[in-house]
Image (spheres, grey):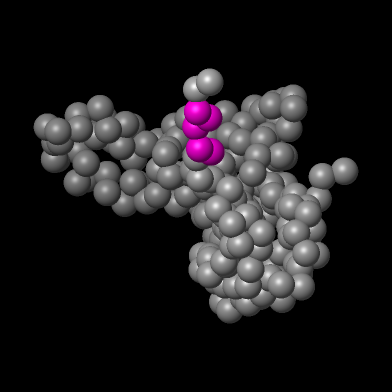
Amino acid sequence: MSMLPRHRTVADVMTARVHVASPLTPFKLLVRLIEENRISAVPIVDQTGIPIGVVSESDLLLKERRGELESEGDLLHPRRRQTERAKADGLVAQDVMTSPPITVAADTRLVEAARLMQERNVRRLVVVDDRGKIAGIVSRSDLLQVFLRSDEELREEIIDNLIPTLMLTPEPIGVEVQYNVVTLHGEVDRKTDVEILGRLTREIDGVVEVVNRLNYRWDDTAAMPAREAW
């Protein structure tokens, strides 16, 4: 069995108990749902539980700007302004929601979920199961939880899990962790061991940075001397 570090997934940090609404939920009830439950967005699902959109606080706040949106144009982004005006005039969820929602599977690695959020410029992802039905919601703050792992927990994972996986002896390798910044020092046999251990340590969930001060006994990356022709 592989003992490489287990990368945490969306399922580890997502909110599984999600408040949802239907496409015909009135505007006021959407506001009440957000305020009473202290959430920032509500997934909109169809009759089968499949998410079809998301209503966020930003979507609802467009109602406050209705007069401004009607009187001002946007020559650079006319389509966006048209969408904002339609949302500002909306009466029910299907009028104001952002659709389609950006979805992700529960077994998606956190780093991949974070990349998707940045690429799509969203603050949350709707989590769906293998049938496409809503299973939860994950936000930016959820993804940041991984950096709350303790220094000791990270140190134990490196010493008890990662180093033995690489068939290295932990005694000559020093591991120090402070504020999730890992410092590696000591000596290993090969230069490639230094590079691999540093890279895999950096990939551990919750590690902020790696200071690699490991030394090596011999450089196994050096080119082998060419054989002389007979």
**Residue 209 is a magenta residue:** no
At horizontal 42% and vertical 38% (from top left) the residue drawn is 120
Number of numbered discs visible in the structure rendering: 0
Viewport quadrant of the N terminus: top right
Q: Could you tell me residue 39's position as x and y percent?
A: 57, 57
Magenta residues, start to end: 224-228
Report whether 205 appears left or right of 64: right
User: Whole-percent x and y of residue 118?
Assistant: 43, 44
Q: Is residue 191 visible?
A: yes
* Magenta span main SS: loop
Residue visible at 53% across and 30% down? 227
- Relative to 45, say whether 170 is above or below: below
Closer to us: 160 or 14:
160
- Return the residue found at the far right: 1
Q: Which residue lies furthest to the top in this view?
A: 230
Residue 132 horizontal side relative to residue 38, left or right: right
Residue at figure coordinates x 25%, y 27% from the top left = 79
In the rendered view, tell whether residue 120 sits above or below residue 14.
above
Q: Where is residue 127 in the image (x, y as percent from the top left)?
A: 65, 39
